[in-house]
Amino acid sequence: MDVSVRELKNRLSEYLRRANAGEEVIVTSRGKVIARLLGPGNAQQASPKEVARMRLRNQPWIRASRGKTPLPHPIARAKSGEKSLSDWVSEQRE
């Protein structure tokens, strides 16, 4: 669960209870991960994959996936009888 610093300050007791119950609470500031709350049973060393994931989440140009999203535009298909892109590139190089 992601929570902003402001929300965490407003409802600290609730998020501490959730962390104690085993839920991971990720604290963000302006969309950037700054902390992670874990209950005492979860206080283990992070796996290399988890460390990599957290580093990626800290990058401002990377956004976490929100599920399967369609492509913004349909994929263009060549019409029958037209040159392929590789043929066109080959001609341009000559």
Image (cartoon, rainbow, N blue to C red):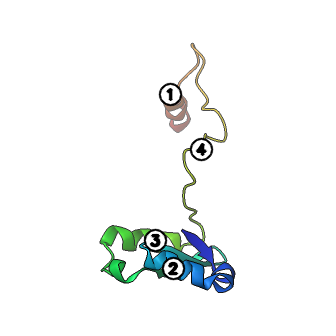
N-terminal of the pair, mark 2 or mark 3, is: 2
Residue at x 55%, y 30% (from the top left corner): 88
Q: Earlier in the sequence, mark 3 or mark 4?
A: 3
Name which of mark 2 and mark 1 comes first in the sequence.
Answer: 2
Residue that label 1 marks: 87
Distance from the alpha carbon under mark 2 to that under mark 1:
63 Å
- Measured as percent of width and height from the top left, residue 8 is found at 63, 81
Q: Decide if residue 49 is on the left or right side of residue 82.
A: left
- Would you say 68 lies left or right of 54 here? right
Cα separation, mark 2 vs mark 4, equals 34 Å
Question: Can residue 72 be seen from the camera position used here?
Answer: yes
Residue 3: mark in rendering: none
Q: Amino acid at mark 4?
A: Thr
**Dividing the picture into quarters, in which one does residue 74 lie?**
top right
Residue found at x 58% / y 62% = 63
Dot label at residue 17: 2
Query: Element at badge 3?
Result: loop
Expressed as whole percent of the image width and height from the top left, the position of residue 4 reads 64, 77
Between disc 2 and disc 3, the foreground one is 2
Q: In the picture, residue 64 is in which quadrant?
A: bottom right
Gap in angstroms between the C-alphas marked 2 and 3: 9 Å
Q: Which residue is mark 4?
A: 69
Secondary structure of residue under mark 1: helix
Residue tagged by mark 3?
23
